[in-house]
Every structure is written in structure tokens, then in C-alpha cells.
Image (cartoon, coloured by chain):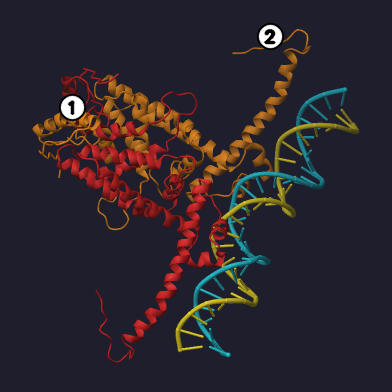
Chain colours: A orange, B red, C yellow, D cyan
Amino acid sequence: MSVVPAEPVESPEPAWRQRAVERSTRAAKLRAEQRVQRFLDAAQELIADKGTTDFTVQEVVERSRQSLRSFYQHFDGKHELLLALFEDALSRSATEMREKLSTVTGPLDRLKVAVDLLYDSSTPREGQQSPLFTDFAIQLLVSHPDQVATAHLPLLALFTELVEDAVKAGQAVTPRPRRTASLIMQTAMFTAQAPAAPVGAQPSRIGAEDVWEFCLGGITGAGQATGGDESGTQKVAATKKAAAKRTTAKKSAAPKGATRTKA
Amino acid sequence: MSVVPAEPVESPEPAWRQRAVERSTRAAKLRAEQRVQRFLDAAQELIADKGTTDFTVQEVVERSRQSLRSFYQHFDGKHELLLALFEDALSRSATEMREKLSTVTGPLDRLKVAVDLLYDSSTPREGQQSPLFTDFAIQLLVSHPDQVATAHLPLLALFTELVEDAVKAGQAVTPRPRRTASLIMQTAMFTAQAPAAPVGAQPSRIGAEDVWEFCLGGITGAGQATGGDESGTQKVAATKKAAAKRTTAKKSAAPKGATRTKA
DNA sequence: CGTCTGACGAGAATGCTATTCTCGCATCGA
DNA sequence: TCGATGCGAGAATAGCATTCTCGTCAGACG
């Protein structure tokens, strides 16, 4: 990109010195990276062990057999450490998801599988690796929304592709695939760690299936048609169009043919 | 429910004493409630002032002109205080929303307005009253999901009604209105404080409109039909049905008639 | 080879909060 | 008036992140 052409007057030590310095530098940089990695690994272990991101910086330091001094020399703070892990995890997750998707064909199938996978990753487990998606992701959402956005980028790209493919195949419609992808992701991720109903409510947990149906067909009925009466679906679809129009144009009174599809 | 019939032998002081005690108690209880209220008010003010829930317990104490001692005598901790405010806010919000909805007719219109309102409440503002929906709600979601669920109950009830009404009017279809309502709420609330795109991405912010369209029609096209070609919508709807089936039953190859509705 | 520099370990010190504890005073009913 | 209970004032404790101080050591450089 920018191979500086060495100013003829100001710097009488053009490239060879630079190379020398760089060689000298390289070692240090390498050592630094190793150290950073050790912190990262230690933190990862702690997260796995304790199932939280509530570990102490001290613990990280001890586990990595380094010093506080060193820690703060390499990270701006605990926050930076977690952010690093977070971005890494999401990025890794995206590629992993891509692999798993490689065996699936059909735009909608692929999208569904993606939703399932994302939902699964976002579900709080006991001993798994999740807390980066759950715990921290959420805290971060409050304090540094933009960084979350950045971290989401790889996944968002993937989902955007999936949506676009579905659209191209005529199996989906949306004016802004990126936004839709974002909405799908958010729905899946947040719903996964959703509040279970307070006490004794049967609809206890909203599952990946529910999320998918919702994303697919929303409320207007298309998604749930997994075996219902043909005519019914057709009817609702027609109604829907009108309803949407009405919502925008302000009007009322509607056909009563309640058309549920399932029991 | 349980007017204890006064055991003949064990307690020779049946009702008069109880009444006396109760009279004596009442005053104390009343004073206690006033104190609690003062804490609550003070906290509310602080939130309004600072725009965060990051106030100190000390601050609450000072502002309410009471003592730390007293605070911890009435609350289990800062957490309880916030939780109280949170539940209150959500409950209040639900009734307020009900009022505003009273002027709107038409199931889908009502639902849409509700989504707008909820989205609006959940949007982080500078000086407004929101932080209870944003800040704290999210922290809470991590630490005490069940309490969040409880707090959401009033709103969930409202949205469930709205969805059910829409279904009854034949303007919507869903097997489990409650779940759908929950999904709609979550989508609106979380998307409102969503991460804006990292740097220079135009689709910067997902708005209430986008949320609504997504909830309404999901991805399968029904929602966006604000003026598209009749036949197109019809076609997509038909395709949709098949697609959904395929998703479940694992199959591939799809009709190519890309049918976008909007530009 | 001697020195100088910059990274590092060990750990004390600081700062911020929540939470608890200890003292007295005051209020209210008996 | 007496005693219990509520409460204000504020000191004490504790958990953590972050900073600072002091030596040490390895490599760079003349």
C-alpha cells in the first residue's frame, strides 16, 4: 500500500536500517504476542472452569504465570481482554458455522440451520463455552454497543449472505437483507437466553423452532404451515396483504374467518 | 381464605389482642412504606439526573435524607431497589400503553402501535427515563432471568391480548399467541438498543418500522406488501408454504421466480 | 566487555463501591 | 418514666480493578 520512497534529504538511513530495526523488533513483538496469548488462554480456561466472565484479573495473571504489571502493559484493562476473546469467539463461530453449512443445500434450509446453530451457541449452558455469548455480550451491549456491532460483523455477513441467497432463489423477500439478517440474529441470540416464564407457565421456553417460525413467517401465518389445510393458508395469505395495507393506511373492520393452522 | 377459628386451649387472646397489635403495627408499617418510597423516589431522581443506574447507594441515602442503616433495613441491597423500580416501571408502562391504545382501532393497528411504543420506550435516550429499560433490564437479564420474566408479565399480557385479538380477527396466525407476543416484545426491545453499525455502514439503525415489518411478515414477504403486485404476493405466499415444508422435511431445489415486492 | 534500556515479576498502594457493624438518640406505647 | 425499637451518623470491612514502586534480567550497542 504505502512503501515510503525514502525522503532523499531527511533520512540518510533508508531501508537497510529499517530492516535491521525490524529484525530487532520482531523478536520483541513475538514475545509480546506469546505473552498476550498466554493471558488469553488463561482467561479462556477460567471462563470454561467457572462458567462466568466474573473471574479476577488476578486469577488470569496467576493462571498465566505472569504479572499484573505485564497484564496492564498488554491490555488496557479487563474489558479489552474480554473484548478480544469475544471478537475471536464470534469470528471463530462464523467460520465454524460456515463449515457446518457446507453440507446443507437449499437457501431456506441453510438459513434455518444457521438459526439453529446460533440459537444453540447463545443458549446458556452449565459448563460450556457460552458465557462469551451470554454474559459478556450483554454487558457489552450496554457499555459499548459499537464494539458489539464490530464483533458481530462476521456473523452478520454470513447471515446476510444466507438471506440474500434465499431472496435470489425466490424463497424469501426483503428490501434490506442486511437488516433482516440482523433482526434474525438478534431474535435468535436474545431469545436463546430469554427469561423462562416466572413460575408455573407451561409455554416455558421459546425454542429454536419457535424462533425460526417467527423469522420465517412472522405473524402473518406463512411460517407455521407445516401441514395445515391448504385453503386456510391460502386465505390467510390473501387477508394478510390487505391487513398490511390497512396498517399503513389506517382503516378497520376485518374478515372474521379465524384460520388457525395448528393445535 | 383462612379465618383461623382460634384454638380453644392454646391461645387465650383471640381477636381483640390481635386487633390491638395490628393497630399498633399499622403505624409502623405505614412509616416503613413511606421510607421505602423515599428511597424509591430518590433513586428515580438520580436515574433521571444521571441517566444511568450507576448511582451509589450513598447517593440514594443522601438524597432521601435517610441513612445507610435504614436502607439496608428496607432493601436487601441495591439490586432489590432497582428491581422494584424496574417492575414498577414496566407495570406502569403497560397501563400507560393500554391508555394510548384505547384510541386505536383494528387489531393489527393496535399491535403496530404497541410495537412502536415499546420500541420507543426501549430506545436509549440522553436524559429520558429509559435506563430502566436499557441499562438495568439487560444486566438483570444476565443475573436474574426469572425476575425479568416476572417483571415482563404485565407487558406480555398486553401483547398476548393484542396478538390474540389479531388472530381472532383473522388478521394473524400463530399457534401460541403468548410465545409470539414474547418474540415480538423481545425483538422490539432488544433491537431498539441494538448496535448501530460499526463505522460507515448506511443501514445504520434498525427502526421501529423495520421491527414491525419483520414481526408482521417475517422473511417470507407478506409484511412488505405495501403496494406491490397482487400476483407476486400471491405467488410468494404459495412458494412459502412449500418452502416451510421443505425446511422440515429436508429436500431441495426451488422455483426461481424471484418475487421482490419493494424497491 | 561494560553499560544502558526496556520488559518483567512481586507485591504494595489507591480508589471506588457495596455491605455490615457500632453507637447513641429519639419516639412511642405501657 | 421505662424499655424496646427505629433510625441517623459514620466507621469498618471486603472485593476488585487499576496504578505505582522497586529490583532484576536479557539483549543492544559502542
Q: Is residue B9 above or below residue A124?
A: below
Q: Is residue A54 left or right of residue A205?
A: right
Other residues around mark 1 within 10 Å, as few (<14) / some (14–19) / many (≥20) = many
Looking at the image, can residue B123 be seen? yes
Where in the figure is residue A72, as x and y percent of width and height?
Answer: 65, 41
Mark 2 secondary-structure assignment: loop
Q: Which residue is mark 2?
A: A5
Name the quadrant of the C terminus of chain A: top left
Furthest residue in direction top, as rendered: A8
Other residues around mark 2 within 10 Å, as few (<14) / some (14–19) / many (≥20) = few
Looking at the image, which is closer to me, B83 or A132?
B83
Marked residue chain, label 2 = A
The three-letter code of the residue at mark 1 reads Ala
Residue at figure coordinates x 15%, y 42% from the top left: B168
Looking at the image, which is closer to me, B103 or A260?
B103
Where in the figure is residue B107, as x and y percent of width and height?
Answer: 20, 40
